[in-house]
Amino acid sequence: MADLSCNLAGIKSPNPFWVASGPPANTAYQAHRAFEAGWGGVVWKTIGVPIVNVASRYSALNSGTERMIGLNNIELISDRSPETNFREIAEVKKRWPHHAVIASLMVESREQWHEFVKRAADAGADGIELNYGCPHGMCERGMGSAVGQQPAVAERITSWVMEVATIPVIVKLTPNITDVTAVARAAKRAGANAISLINTINSITNVNLDTFVPEPTVAGLSSHGGYCGPAVKPIALNMVQACAADPEVGLPISGIGGITTWRDAAEFIALGSTSLQVCTAIMHYGFRIAEDLNDGLSAYLDSKGMKSLDELRGLAVNKLNKWENLDLKFQRVARIDYDKCIGCNLCYIACEDGAHQCIDLKSPDELGLGLGPGRVPHKPVPVVREDDCVGCNLCSLVCPVDNCITMTVTSGDHEPMSWSNYQAKVARGEMQPMPPHP
């Protein structure tokens, strides 16, 4: 069985799955429940000067029968006193000495940062996460994403922390920025030991069309909030890879953003993450998902012959490249398995109206097909004109049946030709400019 133990900048845990700073990491009671369920670490809900929350805090984006594919929140940091939070951190760490307990912090002045960093260490926390990401409420007070959007400010505050830090420091990055690597580099310059990303994305999930007030509604008004959950995973993966690939960053990464399954976890690790933080999935399904996460990731590593997470980490980082370096001669086409086709013809509609009009509808009799699953006599079935197929993937993406439409490589052996290669050859007079598509 593969070893799932994790070491992020000296913060050790029995597995890479940490409860992210948020509602599921608000109390010692929840931390105990999380560790009993199999979580490897807890990043405490952000500690600072206590705030007062509003009563309506969450709204969600649903898709068909899928609930909460995206979650929007206007909840702020901990509304409990620092004394209570640090006392409970000490209690949890005493009971769970081999699990990671990280104190998330957010305060204003240099003096407060020094005080809270020391208090976190005195409470026995294994590390500190600096919350530079909240896009609502706290940023209006000059904290949260107001810091994370300004590399110079993030660097200065991180340097204050490093003046007194005796345990590893993680800088949590905001996605509400043009280039996330700018702040990651600033954290590195200031001496941070690791980064975590992404925090939530500025959002409005929906508007009540009777009252015209967005959700969540607070006495007839609303506010932009922080967006998280499965819907943000592609953005998180992109930013994690950007930091992992940047030689000027060079810091261990705690990956956050829409992690719900072991597959999500494996993708984050392949793109450079060391530990993984989960919040929305816990709010949706409870701490019990830790068992599936751990079992699934372990089985996956075993299936690949990998003995530890180190063998998976970063394998996908260098598979990302600029578009100009992709092979323009690479070709593949869509092929339909009629034994699996249910005759919905979604592929035809998508191709006809939204892509390249290379799927026709033909009689099953003309193709010599039997009735098959979902087919009725004389109802047309989709047929790909391979000579016209550009291999865009759309038909395979809309098809509701797994592996019914597969994208098959047809280019065979060829000399690769990227846009940058082509431009260079044209400039040297080795090739003529390509004619426009008719």
Image: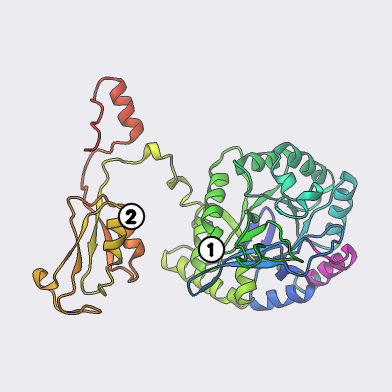
Residue 10 placement (x, y as % from top left): 69, 55
Question: Relative to 286, does residue 52 appear above or below in the rendering?
Answer: above
- Say which residue label 2 marks: 354
For residue 165, above or below residue 420: below
Residue 265 circle label: 1
Q: How is the image coloured?
A: rainbow
The range drawn in magenta is 77-93
Q: CA distance from mark 2 to mark 1?
A: 32 Å
Observer-nearest residue: 134 or 408?
134
Answer with mark 2 or mark 1, whichever residue precedes in sequence.
Answer: 1
Discs 2, 1 touching: Cβ within 8 Å: no
Q: Residues within 10 Å of mark 2 (few under 14, many from 20)?
A: few
Residue displayed at 73% across by 69% down: 56
Q: Is residue 218 visible?
A: yes
Q: Is residue 156 above or below residue 206?
A: above
Secondary structure at badge 2 equals helix
> Does residue 41 appear anywhere in the picture?
no
Given residues 332 and 19, the one toward you in this image is: 332
